Amino acid sequence: GDSSEVQDQLRNVQQIKATNTAFAAIRADGSVVTWGFHFPDQGGDSSAVRDQLRNVRQVAGSHGAFAAILADGSVVTWGDPNEGGDSFDVQDQLKNVQQIQAS
């Protein structure tokens, strides 16, 4: 997990979660910084959902994907779609979520 590319963004970090190939840090302002393996769909690159990762309350990491609960109870996922990184089909059910757990 070489964080040198994002080192300047790793300030006021409240929580760090990991997959087996990437890390996600929640900052005090509710934003998320990710780094790690940037191979497609491994979780280290959250650029596809960066605009949605605001007011993040909690992050959980699975084998190759992350899920984040936002302050409004909605959930944003990214990473390997086969590991939970694509929640499109159940997005309408992911409302008022209080907690997430990954395995």
Image (cartoon, rainbow, N blue to C red):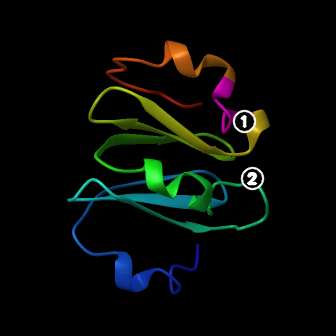
Q: Residue at x 68, y 43 (%)?
A: 63
Q: Is residue 97 left or right of residue 76?
A: left
Tag 2: residue type?
A: Asp
Which quarter of the figure has residue 35? bottom right
Q: Residue at x 68, y 20 (%)?
A: 89
Q: CA distance from mark 1 to mark 2?
A: 9 Å
SS class, disc 2: loop
Viewer-side residue, 5 vs 53: 53
Viewer-side residue, 38 vs 18: 38
Q: Is residue 96 magenta?
A: no
Number of numbered tags placed on the structure image: 2
- Which quarter of the rendered picture does the C terminus lie within? top right
Residue 91 percent across, percent down from the top left? 56, 22
The residue identified by callout 1 is 83
| Residue found at the far top of this picture | 93
Residue neighbourhood size for the residue with mark 1, other residues' Cα within 10 Å, grouped as few (<14), some (14–19), many (≥20)? some
Q: Is residue 55 left or right of residue 53?
A: left
Tell me: residue 11, above or below residue 52. below
Which quarter of the figure has residue 46? bottom right
Report the predominant secondary structure element of the magenta stretch: loop
Tag 1: residue type?
A: Glu
Q: Is residue 72 left or right of residue 16?
A: left
Residue 41 has which mark? 2
| Residue stretch rendered in magenta on the structure | 83-88
Tell me: residue 68, above or below residue 97. below
SS class, disc 1: helix
- Which quarter of the rendered picture does the N terminus lie within? bottom right
